[in-house]
Structures are given as C-alpha cells and as structure tokens.
Image (cartoon, rainbow, N blue to C red):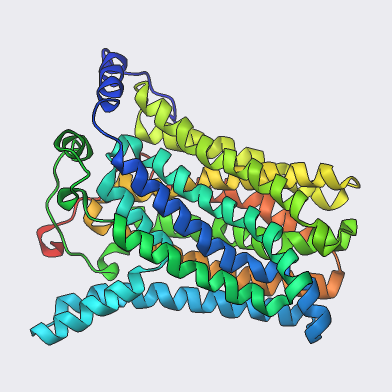
Amino acid sequence: MNLWPASKPGSESKASVATQLAHHLGRFRWIICTVLLLGVMKNYMDRQVIGVLKTTLQHDLGWSEIDYGNLVFAFQAAYALAMAFWSLASIAHGVAYSFTSFLAARFALGLGESAVFPASMKAVAEWFPKKERALATGILNAGTNLGAIATPLVVPWIAVHWGWRPAFFLLGGVGFVWLALWLCVYRRPQEHSSCSQAELEYICSDPAVSQINVSWFELLAHRQTWAFVLAKFITDPIWWFYLFWIPDFLQREHGIALLNIGMPILVIYLISDLGSVAGGWVSSSLIGHGRTVNASRKLAMLICAICVVPIVFAPRISSMWGAVLVIGIAAAAHQGFSCNLFTLSSDMFPGAVVASVVGIGGMAGAIGGMLIAKLVSFFLQRTHSYAIPFFLAGSAYLIALAIIHALAPRLQPVEFTPAEI
C-alpha cells in the first residue's frame, strides 16, 4: 500500500507559486463557503433537537428505547427517500420529451437537490479548484458541529422556560432567514458579479472536462462509486449515533441534567470542529507539498480512523470529562475522515456528476442510519449498556478505509465511455 510516493522535482516550487497567486485572486469563493457552513449548521440544529430533548420527550410522552429508535429510523428512511427522489429526478431529464416534462423534471431536481450535502458539494465543485476542495469541504462540514454546539445551548433553555414545542417552532423559522441569504448571495461563479476574472480563472484552473449526463444506474457500474457509497454506508451511521444518542449517554451514565447538558456537548463539538478543518487541511497541505492525491487523502483518513478507536472504552470511563474528551476526539476524527471522503467524489468523478455520486452516498448513509437506529435501540432495550454501539463506532472507519483502498487503490478518475455521455 504505497501511500507516500516521493514528490516530483520542482513540484514544491510550483505549489508555492500557486499558493502566492491565490492570495491575489479575490476570495468571494470563501463567502460562498461561509453561507454553506451556515446552511449546514441550521440543518444539524433541526436534526439534533430530538436528541437533546430525548429524555424529556420520553418522560412526557412515555416512549421506550424502541420507540425512540423507530423515530430515528423514520427520519433516516425519509432522508434516504429524499436522496432517491433526487436521483430519479436527475434520470427523468433523459426521458423528457417536451418543455412541460423538462419543467417537471427541473422542479423535481431542484426540490430534491435542496438536500444539504449534495447541493453543498456541487457548490464546492463549482466554486473551488481541486486543490482547495478538501479545505472548503472541511469548513462547511464544521457547520455540523456548530449546529450540534448551538442546539444543546439554546434548546434546553427554550424547553425549560417555554416548553419543548416552541423549540421546534423557533428553529424551523431560522431556515427562512438562511434561505433569504442564500438567494441573495449564491450564483455560479461564471454569473456572479463579485467573482473577479482572476478568481474565476483560478477556480477553473483544473483541466477541462467534457459536460456529461450520467444516470445513477451507470454510476453504479464503477468501482469508485462503490468505494464512496460503501464508506458512507459504514461511517455515516456513527455520526447519527453521536447526534441522536450522546446527549442521552451523558445524562444516563453521568447524571447530567437537561440544563447542564450544553457544556459537555459544546466541548465535544468544539473538538470536533477542529478535526473537520484539520482533516481537510492535512490532505490539502500534503498535496500542496507535492504528494499525490491518493497518498494525501488516504493518509489523512488513516490518521482519523486510528483516532476513533479509543471510543470503544467510553462506557468504562468513570469521569464525565474523560468520556467527553474521548468522544470529542472520535467526533473530530469522524469529521476529518468525512471531509476527505466527500472530497473523494470530486477527485474521482467529473464535476458534472459529483452531486449525483454524493446523493447516492447520502442515500446509503441514510440507510445505514436506519440500521444503526434499530441496533442501538435494540441493545439499549436489552442490555441497558452502550458498550456494543461504541465498539461499532470504534471499528467502522478502519473497515471503511480498507474498502476504499480495495476498490480504488489509486483513486483513479472515472472515464466515461461515449455511450455514457
């Protein structure tokens, strides 16, 4: 497994020149990245509110662990269906036969493409050259942690003072504020008045590729697609586990009250934010110093996978802050692994199909999330212990990386045949 080939002569000097030029090209692409970060943050606040209020809702509404697991399962099922809907809308363009049918297909595609990560990765592919995509992905992916930080700080206060129903109403309303910001700010770089000609040329500095229209059935014929999809299927459920069950773990195992849950969750996701940005920075830095994309991405992912392993001991740690530290490091490693995994889609596929690949991977991750919901709730109901769920979390990333390397040993780009174009 050759992950560290020698850099080519002169590559470091070329990378240095490129870095210096980037400082003079304009930075509007980073504003786009910031808006994406805010969108992801809002998205994750909506997701995590149920986890923060789990104990309260179980008490008020009489839910069992199986009931809560079914609730998470329903969310993941809808998430998977949304991804399937998005992919089918893309396919529908190929069979459209009139303006009306194309109009319907575009409407359906826009509706499905509002799924945060497929749309975000498409925006990253449009606004960033390949050398900056891992860092941009790491930054917007940090929005998941910011949302997870804000939720336990805000929601318990609202729930205690106003009730748990207003917490859902207020968080829902924030989405309309973000939507207005997005509509005001976002355009493709070729159409944006704030994107300078120099910055546009830098964004488009990767080798040109032909515009293609490929269905997800055709994408599934390639090993590289399965490398991404299976890795998402294995690792995404672990993040769902953190999101929906860590607040309950801390309350159950360490006796933390609802109003006090904010600080340990804050620490976990602050650590996690560092991992999100650092994971993208490591691989981008290695590429900037002349290492191959294959070596850079996989070495960064290997470091992250190893850092997750100690989480298997979390249920045995008697100190609350000790458990928080171990979980925080694992969550950071997940984010570092995830931002590199997302970037693999743009490493191996043309920009025109990146969102489709991410959408398929997102659907696989949601299906994995459905399974983890059933597994965690089953083990909690039967054993009243988090030991098995944390063991699954600690081993998932090494397995995922092994699958990626087996299916895409060199991260070789997919070349579509004329029949697929």
In the rendered image of this protein, does residue 91 appear above or below residue 332? below
Q: Where residue 182 sits in the image (x, y, percent)? A: 35, 60
Q: Where residue 230 sits in the image (x, y, percent)? A: 47, 59
Residue at the image point whose x is 21% and y is 34% from the top? 202
Q: Along the horizontal axis of the image, is 129 left or right of 331?
A: left
In the rendered image of this protein, does residue 54 appear above or below residue 20? below
Residue at the image point whose x is 40% and y is 72% from the top? 83
In-front residue for pair 358/113: 113
Q: Along the horizontal axis of the image, is 226 left or right of 189?
A: right
In the rendered image of this protein, does residue 83 appear above or below residue 9? below
Residue at the image point whose x is 56% and y is 76% from the top? 75
Residue 308 seen? no
Quadrant housing residue 200: top left
Q: Along the horizontal axis of the image, is 344 left or right of 383?
A: left
Q: Where residue 100 sits in the image (x, y, percent)? A: 13, 86
Quadrant housing residue 56: bottom right
Residue at the image point whose x is 36% and y is 78% from the top? 85
Q: Where residue 256 sits in the image (x, y, percent)? A: 86, 58
Residue 77 seen? yes
